[in-house]
């Protein structure tokens, strides 16, 4: 009897040990190199995610001048790009995102899975509405694309039909490839070299069209330095009360209209290269009809997206105020 009791105790101990061992073992999946296991059971920011950021990202995204203006020591910054999809897009090397780590191999499947689990399981306190507009970021769809479409991607130059020298500057993929953009390296990017040329036979846009302003050149430089991303933002503040010519109206004209409507031979014979010429277009009724895409008017900007409702409202406010030169 004692022997049977002893045997029962031994067997029970073994069974319970196996049961509890299985119960508390972490869920594991093979990593992408096949070298060991991947523990994805307890993924926390402090214990898992931040150490990965330290290992792969903080060399660029920290300090007084972090890359793209994003300091990954700041949890709010990491949370924001985690929410809007930019973090996963970058580490997965997805199209439209600058592959991260910069100049490094893609993270292992295991490490990517840890980021995915953290983002999936985290309830962020203040989810953004749309994609926040960072004042230190130059956005392709909001700024760079309209500027290039207006200044370069026009009929007779670098629109898809003309494609002078095989260069098309009306969409992201063609701008990157035919404009020979090298992310993080403006000086080695053909597009930037062309817009900053001193030689009148090489500079773009070519004479008699007006060259880009220094502010516009600087913005393209900054966009390339930030990775030449196909990015945009949505929730930019729209001020339709404090509208001025110099601070509100003129920057839109320069970025969206100047390429066609300036120089010695402006498109349609309509010049918008200074305050007086813009007021003339307003008084004729052609400006608002064109930017509102009304029947009977040529929709403007040509070959580009319609101005935002915010911009149109700002133009209308400026006109209602008597088109002040302020």
Image (cartoon, rainbow, N blue to C red):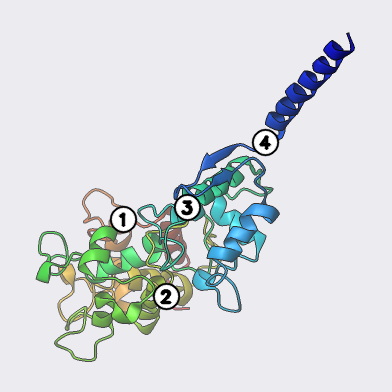
Pick the front one: 25 or 144: 25
Q: Is residue 272 above or below residue 35?
A: below
Say what secondary structure mark 4 lies in: loop
Nearest to N terminus: mark 4 or mark 1: 4
Name the residue beneath numbered marker 1: 305
* Residue 265 location, quadrant: bottom left
- Residue at the spot x=61%, y=36% of the render? 27
- Quarter where residue 197 is shown: bottom left
SS of the residue under disc 2: helix
Distance (Cα) linking label 3 and label 2: 30 Å
Residue 125 image offset from top left, x and y in percent? 69, 48
Point out the image quarter for the N terminus: top right
Q: Which residue is mark 4?
A: 25
Residue receiving disc 3: 108
Taking the spot 40% from the left edge, 75% from the top edge, the residue there is 219
Task: Name the residue located 66 percent from the left edge and 49 percent from the top edge.
Answer: 126
């Amino acid at each position: 009897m004692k022997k049977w009791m002893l045997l029962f105790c031994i067997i029970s101990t073994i069974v319970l040990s196996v049961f509890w061992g299985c119960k508390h073992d972490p869920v594991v999946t093979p990593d992408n190199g096949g070298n060991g296991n991947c523990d994805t059971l307890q993924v926390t920011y402090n214990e898992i995610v931040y150490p990965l950021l330290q290992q792969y990202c903080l060399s660029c995204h920290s300090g007084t001048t972090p890359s793209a203006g994003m300091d990954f020591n700041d949890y709010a910054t990491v949370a924001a790009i985690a929410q809007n999809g930019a973090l996963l897009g970058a580490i997965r090397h997805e199209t439209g995102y600058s592959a991260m780590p910069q100049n490094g191999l893609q993270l292992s499947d295991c490490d990517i899975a840890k980021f995915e689990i953290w983002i999936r399981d985290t309830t962020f306190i203040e989810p953004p509405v749309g994609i926040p507009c960072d004042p230190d970021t130059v956005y392709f769809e909001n700024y760079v694309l309209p500027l290039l479409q207006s200044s370069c991607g026009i009929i007779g130059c670098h629109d898809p039909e003309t494609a002078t020298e095989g260069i098309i500057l009306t969409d992201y993929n063609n701008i990157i490839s035919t404009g020979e953009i090298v992310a993080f390296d403006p000086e080695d990017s053909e597009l930037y070299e062309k817009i900053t040329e001193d030689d009148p036979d090489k500079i773009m846009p070519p004479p008699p069209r007006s060259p880009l302003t220094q502010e516009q050149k600087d913005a393209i430089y900054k966009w390339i330095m930030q990775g030449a991303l196909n990015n945009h933002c949505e929730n930019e503040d729209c001020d339709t009360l404090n509208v001025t010519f110099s601070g509100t109206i003129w920057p839109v004209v320069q970025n969206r209209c100047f390429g066609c409507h300036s120089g010695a031979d402006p498109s349609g014979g309509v010049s918008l290269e200074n305050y007086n010429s813009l007021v003339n277009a307003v008084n004729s009724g052609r400006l608002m009809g064109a930017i509102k895409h009304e029947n009977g008017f040529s929709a403007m900007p040509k070959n580009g997206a319609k101005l935002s409702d915010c911009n149109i409202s700002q133009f209308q406010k400026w006109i209602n105020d008597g088109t002040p030169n302020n």
